[in-house]
Image (spheres, rainbow, N blue to C red):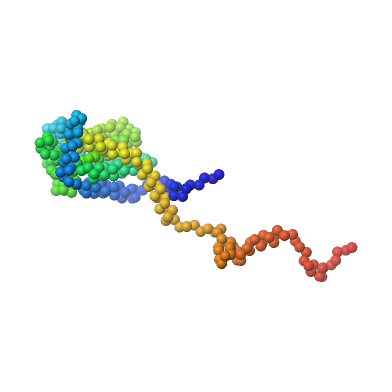
Amino acid sequence: MAQTETPGTEVAPRTRLRWWTELPLILLVYGCYTAGRLLARGDVSSAVDHGLAILRFEKALHLNAEHPLNRLFTREPWLGVPADFWYASLHYVVTPAVLVWLFRARAEHYRAARTWLMTSTFFGLIGFTLLPTCPPRLLSAGHGFVDTMAHYSSYGWWGGEASAPRGMGGMTNQYAAMPSLHVGWALWCGIMLWRFGGTRLTKVCAVAYPLLTALVVMGTANHYFLDAVAGVAVMGVGLLLAPRVTRAADLLRARLVTAAAPAPADAGSPIVSDGCQTSAGERIPRQRESQRASAAEPDAVPRDAGDGTPAPAR
């Protein structure tokens, strides 16, 4: 027995992705990410309270790695300056570079990887909105943190307010510390390099990049240790939900294509007029049935067959 799909559950066939459709999508997600950071400012006092609560919780669990790293980066410029450049730039360079590499060299894996990254990013925006958190560098001096971005600002393009260019610090949300998408995106890049790189160098970079990024965000006093943990957790949630997001996108595309397609003409359907059914090719109702009935009857001798017809010999 032939199986038929339930209407509305069919999945659209996979189509080849094009850069001119992918680029606006990536820019849209990044625009939402930036806008979310700007809009989720929240109350400064609440953000400070959240930051101090995280710090107290870490100290209770003896997880406070931020202080020794921050003191090291502040004391040693050969560590602090590269770390500031790392924090201010690689987040926005490496991630797009890995996306482009996947699109060109590993196209069969690109869509799943891109969906995973985008899904996780949106969950990170939810964290920024619900839990505005003051980073360690913005706590009062009594808590022992030094803002290395401000401390070494003469070496780079950033100012004393944030990693943004000088004079543009007010355009960034400095209280979007939880979760750390610097760590989350770095983890995504590392996994992509490990799975699809294929060389020893890429595997070394796959391990080093997320680990060094975690050290950098803590040493520059931009994130707590638990911010980094939350960044990893957000990527885990995105990984679990990405297949469902992909299926939902396929289903939506299938329905849009079906709705936009013109209805096919049904040549075999009857034309109904005044209660009479006339099939295609008929001029009058039941014309074809009459023709078939006539063809099925045996040949009958006409009544006037004897008129002018010679009689059979006896």
Q: Is residue 19 above or below residue 216?
A: below
Residue at 29 percent across and 35 percent down: it is 190
- Residue 177 placement (x, y as % from top left): 20, 41
The answer to whether residue 151 is visible is: no
**Residue 308: quarter of image:** bottom right
Q: Residue furthest right?
A: 314
Q: Is residue 266 above or below residue 307?
A: above
- Residue 75 placement (x, y as % from top left): 12, 32
Residue at 34 percent across and 41 percent down: it is 241
- Residue 185 placement (x, y as % from top left): 27, 39
Taking the image as shown, residue 14 lies to the left or right of residue 268, namely: left
The answer to whether residue 293 is visible is: yes
Q: Nearer the viewer, residue 8 or 213?
A: 8
Residue at 13 percent across and 43 percent down: it is 160
Q: Is residue 43 above or below residue 76?
A: below
Q: Nearer the viewer, residue 192 or 244?
A: 244
Residue at 56 percent across and 60 percent down: it is 270
- Residue 255 placement (x, y as % from top left): 42, 51
Q: Residue furthest top?
A: 62
Taking the image as shown, residue 78 lies to the left or right of residue 259, namely: left
Q: Quadrant of the C terminus?
A: bottom right
Q: Residue furthest bottom?
A: 308
Q: Quadrant of the N terminus?
A: top right
Q: Nearer the viewer, residue 203 or 170?
A: 170
